[in-house]
Amino acid sequence: MKRLMVPATAVFILVLAGCASNGGSRFVKEEKFVVDTEYVDAVNHVSRQTGVRVTWVNPPTKRVPADSGIDD
């Protein structure tokens, strides 16, 4: 009985792993991240008025629907 238990467990694990899904969820919205140009423009405008130099290392981003047609 013990001899049969190990192979049966291995087969069960392989079958279970084969049933695992790697596809996307139908409940998750398809979104992408793009640079928030309105915010960047506003900060750059104020920085030019006040004489402050701004260097964007990680520009701010926002989520938009994937089919919105807005590119990075």
Image (tube, helix red, strand yellow):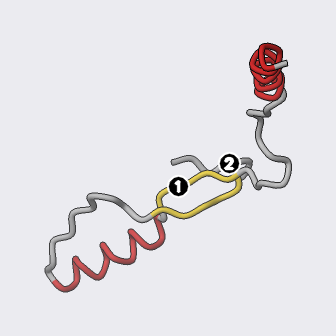
Mark 2 and mark 1 in contact (Cβ < 8 Å)?
no
Q: Kindly identify the amino acid type of the residue bearing the numbered disc 1.
A: Val
Q: Nearer the viewer, residue 28 or 9?
A: 9
Q: Image point 78% across, 24% down: which residue?
A: 9
Q: Nearer the viewer, residue 60 or 13?
A: 13
In this image, 15 relative to 52: left or right?
A: right
Q: Image point 80% across, 21% down: which residue?
A: 5
Q: Kindly identify the amino acid type of the residue bearing the numbered disc 2.
A: Gly
Residue topped by disc 2: 69
Q: CA distance from mark 1 to mark 2?
A: 11 Å
Q: Image point 21% across, 63% down: which residue?
A: 55
Instruction: Answer above or below: position of 9 versus 47.
Output: above
| Residue placed furthest toward the bottom | 50
Residue 23 disc label: none
Quadrant into which the N terminus falls: top right
How far from the left and from the top, in percent, is residue 69? 68, 48
Instruction: Answer above or below: position of 36 versus 6.
Output: below
For disc 1, the neighbor class at 10 Å (few under 14, some 14 to 19, many from 20) is some
Residue topped by disc 1: 34
What is the secondary structure assignment of the residue under circle 1?
strand
